[in-house]
Image (tube, grey):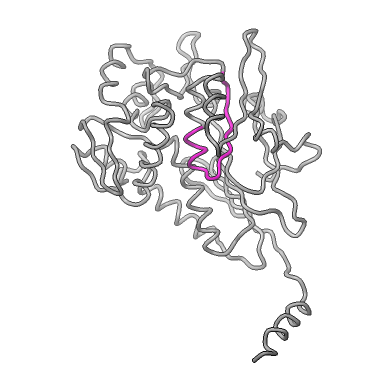
Amino acid sequence: MFLLMPLLLLLRLLLPPAEWHRYELRGKAQGTSWSVIYYAEDSLVTRLQCDSILASLDSSLSIYKSHSRINALNAAEKQFAADRHLSAVLQKGQAIARRTDGAFDLTILPLITAWGFGAKQHTTPPHPTLIEQLRSCTGYRLLRVKGEKVRKAKPCLQVDVNGIAQGYSVDVLARFMEAKRVTNYLVEIGGELRVNGRKQPSGEPFAIGVESPEAAESYGAPLQRYLRLDSGALTTSGNYRRYYLSGNKAITHLLDPRTGFPVQNELVAVTVWAPDAITADAWDNALMVMGLTKALQAVAAEKHLAAYFIYKKNDSTVADTATPNFARLFAGSPTVAQQDK
């Protein structure tokens, strides 16, 4: 018996090193694309498994699925029993709403619909009188969440978790990867991503490209920055993707929950790093609402956040800045790093 451990150690030393394989899975879900890259000795996670998880999440969180739990909540009068996914997202959303003094708020579905960015889209701005009326049905303080018990202070209160659901979905897939003993992976849904470990067998961190507004508007334009990442999540919110024109005015899908009107400040895009994707996903929206000065102050007050900002200066030229802990992720020029996302 005393010889057993030395023999096992000797056998382990004599065995050839593990042969790493790169696996890449891709699909469509939540109105966008998803991808998973992981390194392992064997195929431990399949596309079918990921598709099944994402379909389950849609059944809970999508306002575009008539049978979803979130639509049942929105139709409820006062009390509602959420499932584990909806409960987790609502609790996190409420926590971020309190931290941001309402700059992030899940209860603005009536306003989103009025501005034409809901399930039924249109390009006619609502009258200010209607906005004022709808605001009486919004506000995170009107929603109470305790475990899976949800209480609405007003029947007209409705929630939309699109601003946080993709981040949560990334986290769910990441937890599934780890449950399957995959420790080197990149999970991405619609540009929101989470990383753990490194590329194998090289041991290099994952290289992530942060998109510039020019890259979004013109195919083939260069990315703004490249990052190297071996842990945590990155998400981005911007006002240059979803908008419509009303006369000469751009109406962005990003609404300020505190006013009911589209965000109008110098920020063009915000990329947030956080330990998990649901946190980053909520904060990137809140920071866009705050504007650059208040957003920088807010990130500085949060121990586990880092952020990168693209903004317009007074002369309309575009500039960027980052918090010190985010700047440490910069990898240099695109010639140095091959993008993994």
Query: Is residue 277 inside the magenta stretch?
Result: yes
Q: Which residue is outermost to the right?
A: 335
Quadrant housing residue 61: top left
Residue located farthest toward the left when viewing the structure as drawn? 77
Q: Which residues are magenta?
A: 267-283
Q: Residue at horizontal 50%, vertical 26%?
A: 242
Up/down of 206 relative to 142, above or below? below
Residue 270 picture location, percent across and down? 57, 28
Apparent side of residue 232 relative to residue 49 in the rendered image (left or right)? right
In the displayed structure image, the side of residue 181 where residue 117 appears, left or right: left
Q: Residue at x 65, y 7 (%)?
A: 315
Can you name the residue that lies furthest to the bottom here? 1
* Furthest-front residue in this view: 2
Considering only vertical position in the picture, is 311 above or below 143?
above
Quadrant of the frame with the N terminus: bottom right
Q: How many marks?
A: 0
* Residue 46, quarter of picture: bottom right
Q: Position of residue 15 (x, y in %)?
A: 76, 78
Looking at the figure, which quarter contains the C terminus? Answer: top right
Foreground pick, 147 / 300: 300
Is residue 242 shown in magenta? Answer: no
Position of residue 213 measured from the top left corner of the image (x, y, whole percent): 63, 24
Pinpoint residue 35: horizontal percent, then vertical percent. 58, 49
In terms of depth relative to the viewer, which is nearer, 264 or 36?
A: 264
| 215 sits to left or right of 67 | right
**Residue lying at 42% horizontally and 52% vertically, measured from the top left:** 55
